Amino acid sequence: MTTIDIVPAGERSAALLIEHVIRPDPLSLYGRRAERLRELAVGHPEAAYLEFAAEVCTAQQEIFVSLPHANAAPCITRADALSPNELLAQSCWQEALTKLVQAMPAAAPLATNERARLAHQALSLLQGRFGNVGQRESVFLWAALSLQWSHVAAHVASLHDPWGPAQTRFDCPTCGSAPSASIILGGKRGGLRYLHCPLCETRWHLVRAVCSCCGGADEVEYWSVDEARAVVKLETCRDCHGYLKVCVADFDARADPVADDLASLHLDYEAERMGFLRTGINPFAFPADGP
């Protein structure tokens, strides 16, 4: 493992007008993620599971465009629009789950579960009680929930000025989920770091000089196993002993915080070997307990 010095965002992007929240584009993001997973699967020791994850994402993409909400663009203004109780009461995610069960044989056991049990399991996931739900069930339940949450996140009206002074947020400002990873963007947002939500797919800005878990700035380090220009790196903090991965889009524009995180579990092993605890969530590799 070697440490890497990543220049703080303020030194590269001081004159850039920062977009503090980037809403998702669910009409295309699941398809792009499926493509990335298949690309990463080539020659990977866990290729079979990456291919499975790609199949789930492909099904998500196909199901999203077939759901009644796909062509609607409501302006949602209520503060509780993405609250678990509010969205679990709606039928869209259960309809999406039904379609997932029909599309993927591995999801078939969920077909025998009563709606009340499915809602209870879904609430456990949303509350971070991952150990209460089986790993295979969790993947499909979360995939269905994400289809509904991302739709709402794409259209929810901002409850604050997204271009104003940013409040430091370590959880998703839209739905409250922990991030899956962060990504340092290229292009017009070059050098800016965004945390990525694995549930509603929102991205939100956080300066690179601070820990993505506790906000500390003195003990943050970046690590790479392979090389300085590795697409995925570890961000560790010796203040809170947490870690999260960061993807660098300048090194590969196709990088996806969920896909690339899943394909780099060897970094999780290295981080845990050094005594750090994961602070993020990957919808294809849930922890036994909350992050």
Image: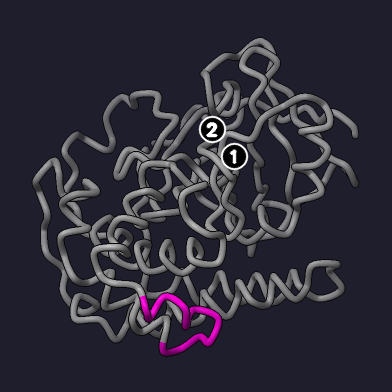
* Segment tinted magenta in the rendering: 102-112
**Point 38% across, 40% down: residue:** 172
Residue 22 horizontal side relative to residue 291, left or right: left
Q: Does 146 appear in magenta? A: no
Residue type, label 2: Ser
Res. 105 mark? none
Labels 1 & 2 near each other (Cβ < 8 A): yes
Res. 191 mark? 1
**Point 68% across, 51% down: residue:** 250
Judge depth for marks 1 and 2 and give the one in front. Answer: 1
Image-quadrant location for residue 158: top left
Image-quadrant location for residue 4: top right
Residue 200 horizontal side relative to residue 7, left or right: left
Circle 2 sits in a helix, a strand or a loop, which is it?
loop
Residue 218: image x %, image y %?
66, 10
Instruction: Give the residue at mark 2.
Output: 13
